[in-house]
Amino acid sequence: METSVFITFIVLAAVLVGLLGLFLVKGRPLTAGKPRREFPADRDADDLPPGAPDEPGGATLVTDRPEGTPADLDTQAPDVTVDTLEKPEAPETRLARLRARLVKSNNIFSKSLLALLSRDEIDDDVWDEIEETLLSADLGAEPTFELVETLRQRVTVEGSKDPERVKAMLREELIKLVDPAFDRSLNVKNPGRPSVVLVVGVNGVGKTTTVGKLARVMVAEDKDVILGAADTFRAAAAEQLTTWGSRVGVPTVSSEKEGADPASVAFDAVEKAIELESDVVMVDTAGRLQNKANLMDQLGKVKRVIEKKSQVDEVLLVLDATTGQNGLSQAKVFSEVVNVTGIVLTKLDGTARGGIVVAIQKQLGVPVKLIGLGEGPDDLAPFDTEQFVDALLEE
């Protein structure tokens, strides 16, 4: 009797433990939002139908927004509060500061060139020196010959050796070369949907840093921004981008797995931006060497997959100004793959020469829209033609 009671007790205890375990599994709080989604093993991101709601996936929203801000994908708990968020510098104040830096780092135009043009007698040898000076400023062969010919005609006709008048002539011609007719504004004002910005470039030019700095520019303009960490091949790239975003309360969509499909992450970032009704989503991509056809194809794929969800409004090519004319071949290849709409020129200080702005625009027919002149978080500003030329000529 005692044995049967004991056995009955054991059975009841086992049943209770099983029920309790089932309750705990069913009642466990789920991570907010949609479950993590992956590509089927036999399916590629390019096979997705337009606007497919359940594909692609595998991305996680890593958000460091203040409490109360909506974010309903898998999240890491934010550690920042409104009080700890940085306030980015306004774009208008950046221009003046960047111009001051450009004045210090570029003196080829303000000293060498003006000195040559102000000589009492400007013969063929002097014009040859002027030509060499412009070429050394990375202006490029065609723009250099065009500028020298125009200046030669004007100096001959006017016959003025007054330094201020010569400087005024040079300023007028440089502004024409830099081309104020270009629309340098970012296409990030699309009512009813997020504007999509794709950022591309080779390794080492500072794409991820540029995306982070540009996010600060957007926040300073009161835009709601989401970042997409589609550079899934470089170790810590997503972490770096997340850190940039967290400083100003901008969330980052990234993959939990290194080496994940970049197109999947890009798609999820755009999808999340649409869901949260953000103003702008910026997608950081892996560095692509222009002689690696498969990598360039991968970049084209990222753009195509994004376009299954939304139009790509801006493709910004990040170039290192210190590479000079070598950057032109990079720019040409990228423009063929993803239809570049604007240039971000970084490191336009130190050994860089301002003439590269003209050379790039002449070759691609694409405007320089942003320039960077330092390592600080707010050392990126919209490009302004007249302020740029004035900085080149300021002594």
Image (cartoon, rainbow, N blue to C red):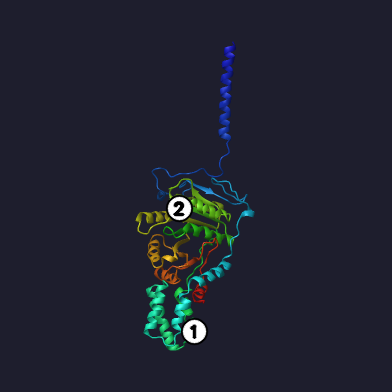
Residue 244 in the image: above or below residue 257: below
Query: Nearest the camera: 117 or 274?
Result: 117
SS state under label 1: helix
Name the amino acid, label 2: Asp
Any part of residue 272 in sight: no
Name the amino acid, label 1: Pro
The tag earlier along the polypeptide, 2 or 1, is: 1
Any part of residue 361 in sight: yes
Q: CA distance from mark 2 to mark 1?
A: 51 Å
**Residue bearing the label numbered 1:** 163
Q: Percent x, y for residue 165?
A: 49, 84
Left or right, 8 with respect to 162, comes to: right
Pointer 1 local density, CA inside 10 Å: few below 14, some 14–19, many at least 20:
some
Query: Nearest the camera: 112 or 173?
Result: 112
Q: Nearer the viewer, mark 2 or mark 1?
A: 1
- Mark 2 in CB contact with mark 1 (< 8 angstroms): no
**Residue bearing the label numbered 2:** 231
